[in-house]
Amino acid sequence: MPKPNNPSNNRNRPRNQEPKEFEEEVIQLDRVTRVVKGGRRMRFRATVAIGNRKGRVGVGIAKSAEVVGAIKKAVTEAKKHMINIPIFNDTIPHRVSAKFKASKILLIPAGAGTGIIAGGATRIIIELSGIKNILSKSLGSSNRLNNSKATIDALIQLRKREEKKPEPKVEAPVKPVERVKIEAEQTGAKRGSPLPPKKPNSK
């Protein structure tokens, strides 16, 4: 026999949540302190990256007394500073580099099947942006916060690349001599053929 429907069990079931517009990823979570008159005040600093994997990505940094509060504030801050990335054939349109403080990031376009050759904060941001093939190199400090800022600065510099349209075929102009030959072939006359015989005069 089917079990009776218990209304108390329905209340505990999770409701169907709507899919989020952006995916969230915590890049770094630090505990920071500030010295005040009464002692030290401890807070949490969260660095969060969000993106829709379709060319939009953003990074936010925020502080709070609680970890959850710091992450929520960072997500709100990231939504305010979203950028659009021009993706060309699942990679970036051209080579670009950027520097932020002691960190320097170099991004190079790659062919299909290469994947994301990156690490740390750069890999998280690139994955959330929707780029599938790229080469990157960190030439400075390994600080995740600075690397995330440098990566965003590099992606901002990207410019859209238009696909080349096939050029229409233009026929070469026909020379006068060749034009005469073509017309002669079309009419069936051959150059240098003897003239037809004259008809005799009737008396």
Image (cartoon, rainbow, N blue to C red):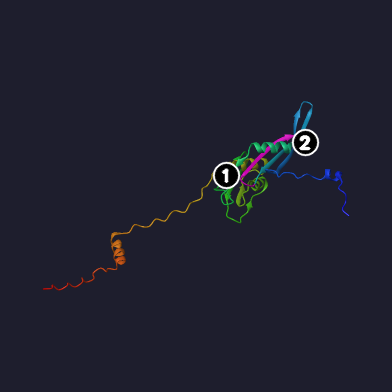
Name the foreground residue: 180 vs 26: 180
Q: CA distance from mark 1 to mark 2?
A: 35 Å
The span shown in magenta is 53-66
Determine the image quadrant of residue 169.
Answer: bottom left
Res. 69 visible in picture: yes
> Is label 2 in a helix, a strand or a loop?
loop
Q: Is residue 58 left or right of residue 161?
A: right
Q: Is residue 139 left or right of residue 185?
A: right
Q: Could you tell me residue 194's position as x and y percent?
A: 21, 72
Q: Could you tell me residue 45's position as x and y percent?
A: 72, 37
Res. 143 visible in picture: no
Q: Could you tell me residue 171's position as x and y percent?
A: 38, 57
Amino acid under label 2? Glu
Near mark 1 (Cα within 10 A), the count class, few <14, some 14-19 or many ≥20, is some
Q: Is residue 117 left or right of residue 94?
A: right
Determine the image quadrant of residue 159.
Answer: top right
Near mark 2 (Cα within 10 A), the count class, few <14, some 14-19 or many ≥20, is few
Disc number for residue 66: 2
Which residue, given by chain and number where applicable, does mark 1 sit on?
97
Query: Which residue does the image show at 31% across and 64% down from the upper left?
Result: 182
Determine the image quadrant of residue 154.
Answer: top right
Going from N to C along the chain, the mark reached first, 1 or 2, is 2
| Quarter in which the C terminus is drawn | bottom left
Q: Main secondary structure of the magenta part?
A: strand
Name the foreground residue: 71 vs 63: 71
Amino acid under label 1? Ser
Which one is in front in this view, the residue at disc 1 or the one at disc 2?
Answer: 2
